[in-house]
Amino acid sequence: MQYQLVLQFPYDGVSDYDRAIELENELIEVLGDSGDVDGHDVGGGKLNIFVHTDDVESVFEQARSVVERVGLLPSLRSAYRHLPDGEEFTVIWPLGAQDGFDVL
C-alpha cells in the first residue's frame, strides 16, 4: 500500500481510548480490503488511527462516514503521506485546513 492515512482525534483519557478501539474495529469491518487498519497511538493529547491504502480519497470517505455515524466528526483531523518514507502530511480534513499536521 502506498499511502498512510491518519485519523486524528483529541485524547482525554480511558473513555476516549475505549471509544477509539471501537471505532478502529468498525473501520476494519467497513474498509475490508480497501484499507489496512494498522493500529493506533496516543501522544501529545491526540489519538491517531493509522490506515494503509492505495486509494486515499475512497478510503477516507468510507472512514469519514463511520466517524460521522459515531458522532466524532466535529473532532476529526485527517491527513495522509506517501509510504514508505514520506515525511510531509497532506491535510484532507477538515476541508480547507491550512495548518500543519503532526503525529508524535
Image (cartoon, grey):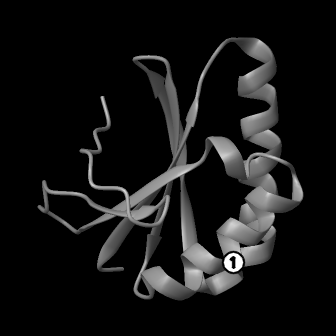
In which quadrant of the rendered view does residue 29 lie?
Answer: bottom right
Left or right position of 83 against 73: left
Mark 1 residue type: Gln
Q: Is residue 95 above or below residue 104?
A: below
Helix or strand or loop: what does disc 1 sit on? helix
Q: What residue is drawn where x is 37% and y is 56%?
A: 97
Q: What residue is drawn where x is 56% and y is 74%?
A: 60
Left or right position of 56 against 23: left
The spot of residue 52 in percent (x, y) is: 44, 69
Work out whether residue 22 or residue 79 is closer to the camera in this orientation and state it: 79
In which quadrant of the rendered view does residue 33 lie?
Answer: bottom right
Left or right position of 11 against 86: right
The spot of residue 25 in percent (x, y) is: 78, 54
Q: Which residue is mark 1?
A: 62
Q: Look at the image and tell me in which quarter the C terminus lies.
A: top left
Q: What residue is drawn where x is 81% and y is 34%?
A: 19
Work out whether residue 30 or residue 74 is closer to the camera in this orientation and state it: 74
Q: Residues within 10 Å of mark 1 (few under 14, many from 20)?
A: some
